[in-house]
Image (cartoon, helix red, strand yellow):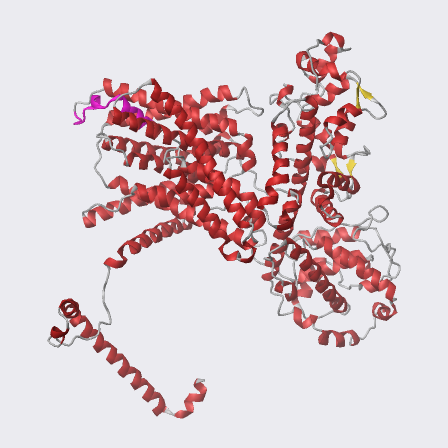
């Protein structure tokens, strides 16, 4: 991936973006060069081997858009900044992009393609199918999905809503897991 | 039989008694004779051995020695067994006194016992009690503990924190060694205790450095013993524990280095450089040797499908060979053992049977537990034995310096490390890490094999430091952990959700890193996984398990655990007395016809069409597949199925078999529930639990069933509201079971209004009814004593000792 140093001047609303995402101008500048007008094909090339590659690509693009501009790109990547431990919720500032909640929300949205706020069984099956591919039978996939839903679904609506998703992951160290060090 | 003998009369009895008495008398006489002639016999035996045929006639006729004492031949194994038995009994004893084991860690108690025993032995025999020889320690007692630690090492947190661990292990130990060694030398030079007979200034710098290197190593045995009881969070545990394991390489190198220097008498820069190179060789060489043996073990386990019995033996032997081979070349045996266990584990576990897995786990835990106990007891005994050179200056300064060195080392290193970590180490973490630096038996053994003239004073100091850390730090760490509110370990096991989502996040992060062009942690892990899957697994894992993705393997493991739990909890059931009588067809048939009021439901039975019946059967079968995971087995048929099957395909097969059996049972119990059995206690219990009239309506009645005829495994949840019942293993009268019944009631999915109000409770859809049936049947069985004793089935959690 080509990258070269470019300043933030070329980027519209640079300062606001900085505030919103917390990314330093230098770091984001490095990415900005190739990000202006990035198309989905460019991203897909990188993620060809990744089982959920097209979902990740889809997350960058707003629905209906063909290209992603720099601010949206940075906004998405901002979710992966390491969490600061001393951030306290005081209700005045909006929640920073890299808080645990926002990270989980981002991950949730990757599951929930139709954006109805729940991960239905079909969506879960799709994800499992993508991750496990042709190595397993349909029956096994369905039993796994069934078990997963049975374990997580507390209000018995046969789908996993965001709260249930968050609850099932409360023991996992999301702050550590969903952080890319380079984005500090 | 006795009744048959009685008619023989008193004479018969009397005769047998007399015979018995005579026999006893004869034996006694013989015994006396032998005891008396024992001396003669032994002496004459010797005589007869020397002189051959001629003297044979001359010796007095000795009686055959019935009883004799021959202790020397068995003395060594006898004593060893006695020690091990004593150790185990002590362990038993501690856990019987709950208050004691809460306050005092086990290691302290064991050392105290050792002190006691050593003291008694010294007073009684007035000779040196058996001492902890270094060969026994390093060759027999240490390997099981390390293998246990290495085999069950949680790989993911270990590798994630490997940088931190290595920093602490290498740099921290070096710092400790030089700091303590150097300052102790300074203290020796300065201080002069007039009342002590030891001239401290005699101790040169090199012996001091050697002493420093021995005492600076954090001991895995002591750390394990103490940290297992305090249950701190995984991160801290793996940091301190990993450090204690990896610093062995540093200790080995420093020890040999300084010993060589002491022999040669001079140090040069080249030697220092060689020392550095030697460190790399020792560490990496140990790991390579271990990995090599690990791969061999994995490869061997691929072919053991026909000889399951010796599978555990391979694991143990290969690991021990790894340790010994490393020791041959002066490489780090501990690191080799860890590497062997860690490398071998994923492949071996995919290959071996479930029973072998359990065997390995329990043998390792047992051996390591016994070893640990013995080590601490021997430590106590060895303290009593042997002369000590008390020098207060030396001792106190050693202890103080060790503490200070540790604190400064940890704080300084954390400052540097935190610049590179995502999740920083807080002050609390640093305190626990510093406080958890316990010294133990390795330091003692290393000191024991010293060839220095100051060996005695060093040993005394080492023992003092060990006692201080184990007693003071070991006892106070638990209250401190509570006081500082350090995060504790998460108790529960991983659920399938966590597994799925963690994998998902792994892929996500790999993707993001690819986008950023940043080759981070996830990138390399992904590459390693792909390499592993493509090449390594094919070679090392038998059959088609090599293609099984990890998620599936995990899922199967979970299913297996559930199946075993189900069978085990069903095994405690007391239903056998009541159930078979009700299940058997003979009893049922009359009951159907006997009740006076012919219920409309019964008449509905023969009117069911064949097609409808088939549908319902399908529905019930699919539901059995779903709820199989949670229901207990409630009849003896399913208990017969052996849960410990060898392959996972068998599991699926047996599942189907169980399903069919269950279906048959269900058919029978349909009839069971129609009449109201009066006297059965289990039925009345079920009635009480449900809180309602237990008038079941058999499945066959549901003609108005709107279930789709989709006989595929899944019923689309779209149209109907498929209730998912989570029946947990609770007793019939628990609130859970009642609550679940309520939920069934509230579900409006497929209602069919029936004339009697009471039967409204038991719903209408075939599915529901199937579950109700099972619910009732579950009520009939006793859940058994230990329903939630599933600690045993978690691989990653240590079995509490």
Per the image, is B211 magenta? yes
The total number of labels drawn is 0
Q: Name the residue: 66% across, 55% down.
A: B649
Q: In this view, does B776 lie above or below B446?
A: below
Residue A80 location in percent, x, y? 67, 24
Q: Which quadrant of the figure contains the N terminus of chain B? A: bottom left
The quarter holding residue B498 reads top right
The quarter holding residue B786 reads bottom right
Residue A163 location in percent, x, y? 72, 35
User: Which residue is more in the foreground, B386 or B700?
Assistant: B386
The quarter holding residue A88 reads top right
Q: In this view, does B48 lie above or below B256?
A: below
Q: Name the residue: 41% across, 28% down.
A: B279
Name the magenta segment's main secondary structure: helix
Q: In this view, does B549 lie to the left or right of B444?
A: right
The part of the chain drawn in magenta is B195-212
Q: In this view, does B436 lie above or below B563?
A: above
Can residue B229 be seen here? The reply is: no
Q: Name the residue: 55% across, 48% down.
A: B791
User: Which residue is more in the foreground, B213 or B473?
Assistant: B213
Per the image, is B801 magenta? no
Can residue A174 be seen here? The reply is: yes
Residue A156 location in percent, x, y? 76, 44
Residue A138 location in percent, x, y? 76, 48
User: Which residue is more in the foreground, B788 or B288?
Assistant: B288
Q: Is residue B597 left or right of residue B729?
A: right
């Amino acid at each position: 991936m080509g990258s070269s140093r470019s300043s933030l001047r070329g980027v519209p609303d640079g300062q606001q973006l900085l505030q919103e995402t917390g990314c330093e101008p230098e770091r984001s500048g490095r990415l900005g060069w190739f990000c202006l007008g990035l198309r989905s094909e460019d991203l897909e090339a990188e993620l060809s081997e990744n089982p959920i590659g097209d979902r990740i690509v889809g997350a960058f693009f707003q629905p209906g858009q063909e290209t992603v501009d720099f601010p949206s790109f940075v906004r998405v990547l901002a979710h992966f900044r390491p969490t600061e431990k001393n951030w306290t919720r005081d209700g005045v500032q909006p929640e920073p992009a890299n808080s645990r909640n926002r990270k989980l929300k981002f991950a949730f949205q990757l599951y929930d393609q139709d954006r109805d706020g729940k991960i239905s069984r079909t969506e879960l099956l799709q994800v499992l199918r993508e991750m496990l591919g042709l190595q397993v039978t349909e029956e096994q996939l369905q039993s796994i999905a069934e078990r997963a839903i049975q374990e997580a679904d507390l209000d018995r609506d046969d789908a996993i809503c965001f709260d249930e998703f968050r609850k099932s992951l409360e023991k996992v160290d999301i702050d550590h897991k969903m952080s890319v060090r380079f984005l500090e | 039989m006795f009744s048959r003998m009685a008619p023989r009369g008193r004479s018969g009895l009397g005769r047998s008694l007399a015979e018995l008495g005579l026999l006893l008398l004869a034996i006694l006489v013989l015994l006396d004779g032998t005891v008396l002639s024992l001396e003669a016999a032994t002496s004459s035996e010797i005589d007869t051995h020397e002189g051959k045929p001629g003297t044979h006639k001359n010796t007095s006729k000795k009686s055959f020695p019935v009883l004799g004492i021959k202790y020397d031949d068995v003395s060594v194994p006898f004593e060893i067994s006695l020690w091990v038995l004593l150790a185990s009994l002590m362990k038993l004893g501690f856990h019987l006194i709950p208050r004691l084991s809460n306050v005092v860690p086990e290691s302290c108690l064991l050392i105290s016992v050792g002190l006691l025993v050593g003291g008694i032995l010294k007073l009684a025999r007035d000779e040196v009690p058996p001492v902890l020889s270094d060969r026994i320690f390093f060759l027999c007692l240490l390997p099981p503990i390390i293998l246990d630690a290495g085999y069950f090492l949680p790989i993911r947190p270990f590798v994630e924190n490997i940088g931190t661990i290595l920093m602490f292990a290498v740099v921290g130990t070096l710092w400790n060694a030089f700091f303590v060694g150097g300052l102790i030398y300074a203290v020796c030079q300065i201080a002069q205790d007039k009342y002590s007979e030891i001239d401290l200034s005699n101790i040169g710098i090199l012996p001091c450095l050697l002493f420093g290197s021995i005492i600076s190593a954090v001991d895995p045995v002591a750390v394990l013993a103490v940290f297992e009881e305090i249950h701190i969070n995984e991160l801290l545990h793996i940091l301190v524990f990993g450090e204690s394991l990896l610093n062995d390489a540093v200790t080995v190198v420093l020890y040999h280095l300084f010993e060589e220097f002491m022999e040669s008498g001079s140090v040069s820069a080249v030697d220092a450089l060689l020392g550095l190179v030697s460190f790399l060789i020792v560490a990496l060489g140990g790991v390579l040797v271990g990995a090599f043996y690990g791969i061999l073990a994995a490869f061997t386990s691929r072919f053991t499908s026909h000889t399951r019995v010796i599978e555990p033996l391979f694991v143990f032997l290969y690991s021990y060979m790894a340790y010994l081979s490393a020791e041959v070349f002066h490489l780090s045996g501990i690191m080799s053992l860890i590497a062997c266990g860690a490398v071998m584990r994923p492949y071996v576990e995919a290959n071996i049977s479930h029973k072998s897995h359990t065997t390995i786990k329990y043998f390792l835990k047992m051996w390591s537990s016994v070893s640990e106990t013995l080590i601490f007891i021997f430590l106590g005994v060895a303290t009593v034995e042997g002369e000590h050179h008390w020098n207060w200056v030396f001792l106190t300064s050693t202890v103080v310096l060790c503490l200070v060195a540790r604190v400064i080392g940890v704080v300084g290193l954390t400052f540097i490390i935190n610049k590179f970590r995502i999740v920083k180490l807080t002050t609390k973490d640093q305190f626990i890490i510093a406080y958890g630096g316990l010294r133990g038996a390795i330091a003692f053994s290393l000191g024991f094999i010293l060839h220095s003239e100051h060996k005695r004073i060093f040993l005394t100091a080492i023992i003092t430091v060990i006692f201080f850390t184990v007693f003071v730090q070991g006892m106070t760490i638990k209250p401190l952990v509570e006081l500082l509110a350090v995060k504790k370990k998460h108790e529960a096991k991983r659920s399938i959700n966590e597994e799925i989502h963690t994998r998902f996040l792994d892929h996500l992060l790999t993707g993001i890193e690819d986008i950023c062009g940043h080759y981070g942690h996830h990138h390399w892990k992904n590459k390693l996984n792909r390499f592993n899957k493509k090449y390594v697994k094919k070679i090392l894992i038998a059959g088609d398990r090599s293609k099984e993705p990890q998620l599936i393997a995990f899922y199967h493991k979970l299913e297996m655990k559930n199946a075993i739990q189900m069978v085990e909890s069903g095994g405690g059931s007391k239903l056998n007395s009541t159930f078979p009588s009700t299940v058997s067809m003979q009893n049922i048939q009359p009951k159907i016809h006997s009740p006076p009021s012919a219920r409309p439901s019964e008449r509905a039975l023969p009117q069911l069409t064949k097609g409808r019946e088939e549908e319902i059967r399908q529905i019930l079968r699919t539901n059995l597949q779903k709820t199989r995971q949670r229901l207990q087995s409630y009849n003896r048929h399913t208990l017969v199925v052996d849960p410990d099957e060898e392959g996972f395909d068998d599991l699926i097969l047996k599942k189907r078999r169980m399903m069919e059996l269950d279906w048959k049972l269900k058919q029978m119990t349909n009839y069971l529930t129609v009449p109201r059995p009066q006297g059965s206690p289990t039925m009345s219990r079920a009635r009480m639990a449900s809180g309602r009239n237990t008038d079941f309506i058999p499945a066959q009645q549901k003609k108005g069933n709107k279930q789709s005829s989709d006989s595929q495994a899944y019923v689309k949840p779209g149209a109907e509201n498929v209730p998912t019942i989570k029946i947990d293993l609770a007793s019939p009268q628990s609130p859970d079971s009642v609550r679940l019944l309520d939920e069934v009631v509230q579900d409006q999915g497929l209602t069919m209004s029936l004339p009697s109000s009471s039967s409204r409770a038991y719903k209408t859809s075939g599915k529901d009814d199937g579950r109700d049936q099972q619910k009732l049947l579950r009520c009939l069985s006793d859940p058994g004593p230990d329903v939630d004793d599933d600690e045993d089935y978690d691989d990653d959690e240590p079995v509490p000792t």
